[in-house]
Image (cartoon, helix red, strand yellow):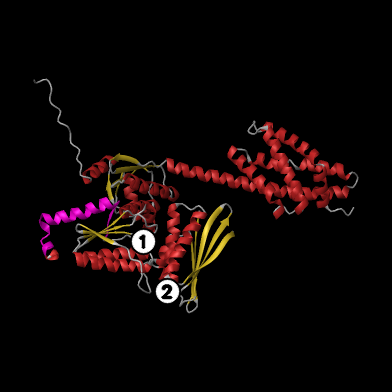
Amino acid sequence: MTMDGTEVLTRTVTEDEATILDGWTGALRESASLQGGRIREAELQTQAKAVLGQFRDALVAGGLDADGESYAPLRETLADISRSRAIQGFTPTDTANFVFSLKEPVFEALRLKSGADASAQAAGMWAGGKVIDRLGLQTMEVFLASREEVIGRQGQEIAELSTPVVRLWDGILALPLIGTLDSARTGVVMENLLQAIVDEEAEIAIIDITGVPTVDTLVAQHLLKTVAAARLMGADCIVSGIRPQIAQTMVHLGVELNVVSKATLADAFAVALRRTGRKVVRQQVPTEGRG
Amino acid sequence: MTITKAETLPIRSGDDVVRVRQRVRALAIEIGLGLVDQTKIVTAASELARNTLDYGGGGDVRTEIVQAGTRKGLRLIFEDQGPGIADIEQAMTDHYTSGGGLGLGLGGAKRLSNEFHIESTPGAGTRVTIARWK
Amino acid sequence: MDRIPILKLGGALIVTIQVDMHDRLALALEEDLTAMIARTGARGVLIEISALEIVDSFIGRMLVSIAAVSRVLDAETVVAGMRPAVAITLVELGLELTGIKTALNVERGMSLIQARLAEEEDGHGSDRDHHEG
């Protein structure tokens, strides 16, 4: 009657570990088949066994305090599992269910163990529900954090992919910008261009914005900063492809693009060639048929 | 937001300013800031450490690695017991200087940081807090 | 106290800054360079900073002031090899280093200075004799 829930739970999990594990892996197997075989059964079994073992140790050492020191190894294991699931593309439900499906076999074991002692059973279930819920939430937090990390990394990769710096000629680079520029992307663009200037020892970089639909004050400022930074490094920038509407907007916004600008990439390239001491001439084709 | 690592460095001499720069660089690398962000926070720290030394008559800086959710950041708190700043708004404007400098210290440090906060009591001292997030 | 060595090459002075500069060291460099320009009649000053991990407003001011003093002494200052991260930070800081020529590396910097010397020898440099005499 006076039995403490934690005690009931701890005793049940310790003594009936094998039964609980059986019940749990059974439940997991069922849901795994629904998950389209993203994970092998053997792996699931190993994970379940490890988690349950650590859960037992944590209960014995630290009671229900799922945020405490004794739960650290278990939290670590669960974090690893949910991280790998986030990367493998599991849904949040699949991931949460891995932990929550432990409830059923634990409650079943508590029912069998307590027999007629309803209050002991209730206390044990309350304790078990509480600690498993907490573990489930922790797992979800890690899952979401990992997903955010994946998304962040993808964003970074897209930003890098979509801003190729091309070498037009010895010492002349071009950066054809396509799509909307936000300040995060512009930052990456800026760094890539400046690094390419160092790597290629480029004297002139052409920033072509033909593919940029709108230029607001912020983007204009970023462009100006890039040009200023390139100048500090000893390279010149030419901005090309400013469309008439954009030019108009910028004047209305009061943005002064105090840089060399050319209508087209071709014009800018011609200027760049001239500045680096080169000249494009049409080859004299010998007139045929008069011989 | 939790502080996962904190330490305090003195700013009493020019050598200390160099040491603050080096320490801030190491911490910025530790939390995984990119090269440009590292450079920005180190430069901001250099400006503020020099302010603390030149205008505040020396003081110290507390460096903190902070964590908010999944984001890590580096927070620096510069503190001196110097004469303080009477008109903070004026001190924040570029090219304002109370002695010798280019007057880019405070405004520049603000532009180089994600967070900037200054409190000052004339006669009691100044405290500037900056943070840069990953 | 440590000092940063200054090399003389042709009509130019070359300085490579390799260390995280202490404020006093920066001030000493400014003084040494000024004295050296006056003594040697150098027409160009090349400051190579590719090893510098940061340039704050103090170092920026030193560079601007070296350039200004040099100009008065009829020498041109070229800063070479600034890192991208440093350049971005300087722009954000609000320092444009006006009056300073820049170059990607020492080689480019030297050719800037030599181009100026050659231009003056081609006739514009009537005051040159006065300087070297």
How far from the left and from the top, in percent, is residue B125? 49, 75
Q: Is B34 on the left or on the right of C17, as rendered? A: right
Mark 1 Cα within 10 Å, few/some/many (few <14, many 20+)?
A: some
Q: Quadrant of the N terminus of chain B?
A: bottom right
Most common secondary structure along the magenta stretch: helix
The range drawn in magenta is C100-129
Q: Residue at x 19, y 58 (%)?
A: C11
Residue closer to the observer: C39 or B121: C39
Q: Is B69 on the left or on the right of C38, as rendered? A: right
Dot 2 falls on a residue whose secondary structure is loop
How far from the left and from the top, in percent, is residue A76? 65, 48
Please report, as a chain letter, where disc 1 is located: C
How far from the left and from the top, in percent, is residue B20? 46, 64
Residue closer to the observer: C9 or A46: C9
Q: Residue at x 39, y 51 (%)?
A: A219
How far from the left and from the top, in percent, is residue A184? 45, 49
Q: Is residue C86 above or below residue A30?
A: below
Dot 1 falls on a residue whose secondary structure is loop
Q: Is residue A68 visible?
A: no
Whether residue A79 appears in magenta in the rendering, the answer is no
Instruction: Read off the residue under disc 1.
Output: C94
Mark nearest the camera among 2 and 1 is: 2
Amino acid type, callout 2: Tyr
Q: Which mark is residue B55?
A: 2
Whether residue C112 appears in magenta in the rendering, the answer is yes
Amino acid type, callout 1: Gly
